[in-house]
Amino acid sequence: MTNSSQSAPFTSQQGLAPKLTGLRYAPRWFGGVMCYMVFGLGGLLSSLTILPVLRYWPGSKQARIARVQRTVSLMFKGFVTMLTAVGIIKVSTHNLHVLQQARGNIIIANHPTLVDVVVLISLMPNAGCIVKQALWHNPFIRGVLSSVGYIPNRSANLLLQDCKQVLNRDTNLVIFPEGTRTLVGSVINQFARGAANIAIRTQSNILPVVLRTDVPGLTKQESWFQIPRQTINMSVEVADSVLQHDNEITQGNEAKMARKLTRDLQQFYLNTLSTTIDSHTDKKQKNELTQPN
């Protein structure tokens, strides 16, 4: 995995990875399944051992949660390294320093693969996310979720309170506005207004991240054990700056502003993902996110 903030995203000039068939695919499949097994067992063991120790080690609540978040980020980085070693995914980054320096921002991204959240959290030492309530009943990751201070997706009012608390302690909140992985054949799914509503009602800034992949794999239409036959080159492209909340938003027009912000964000991703990066010109993206008025 490339960690340098200077590393360039892959471009149309690069060739696709070869597609493995027959016996050549067997090591890839076994390697991928082993990665998932290590991830599940690692989550269970860490939730029973190191994470509780870090969580209850002396210090303020914020310091304890920050320790666990850094540890989970390192664990996820190790998992991404394993996926890279067996040839499932190869990650490159652009403007990574902006992401690593972000504090208390809402990090939004499109959602092409199963491992998007793992990749993003592996690149940030202070990340949180909203997870399905059903996952809190999963013995493999329940302890991890509790220790790291992630947010269960419950009623709107409680969710908003949880998000505000997380953002106020300088944790970045990762949200995928698509809600689920992008359907194969689509640029993105229709954006939901959740991220925009949270940003507006907590007066938080948004930092867009574009995840660009060159071949489909680990998609919504595939089971977890359908290991990609081609290496997925993923470019993590971080915006140059955050989208600041509108100070003119007043009580009563939040819903209207959330709709507008959602449309702007969706159009930004449509434009950006439809644009091919030219490695020879090394120019910035022409399509910039329009700030709400």
Image (spheres, helix red, strand yellow):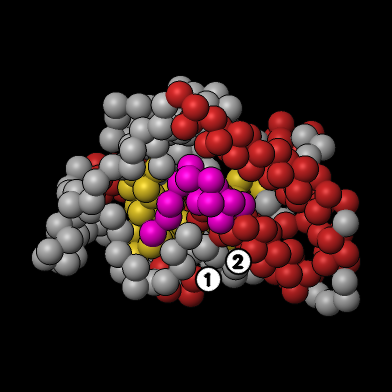
Q: Residue furthest left?
A: 281
Q: Is residue 5 magenta?
A: no
Q: Is residue 231 visible?
A: yes
The tag earlier along the polypeptide, 2 or 1, is 1
Residue 2 picture quarter: bottom left
- Reply above or below: 145 against 69: above
Secondary element at image label 1:
loop
Secondary element at image label 2:
loop
Q: Residue furthest bottom?
A: 59
- Residue 48 image offset from top left, x and y in percent: 88, 51
Q: Residue furthest front?
A: 23
Residue 59 picture quarter: bottom right
Residue 230 picture quarter: top left
Question: Hey, what amino acid is under mark 1?
Answer: Arg
Position of the C terminus by quadrant: bottom left
- Reply above or below: 39 against 95: above
Asked whether 291 or 72 is in front, the reply is 72
Foreground tag (2 vs 1): 2
Asked whether 286 or 237 is in front, the reply is 237
Determine the residue positioned at 36% across, 33% down.
19
Label disc, if present, on residue 174 of the rendered structure: none
Left or right for 2, reference 174: left
Label 1 crowd bin: few (<14), some (14–19), many (20+), radius 10 Å: some
- Residue 58 image offset from top left, x and y in percent: 88, 76
- The residue under label 1 is 103
Question: Hey, what amino acid is under mark 2?
Answer: Asn
Label disc, if present, on residue 126 of the rendered structure: 2
Identify the magenta region: 79-92
- Reply above or below: 61 against 230: below
- Residue 101 image offset from top left, x and y in percent: 48, 74
Marks 2/1 in contact by CB < 8 Å: the verdict is yes
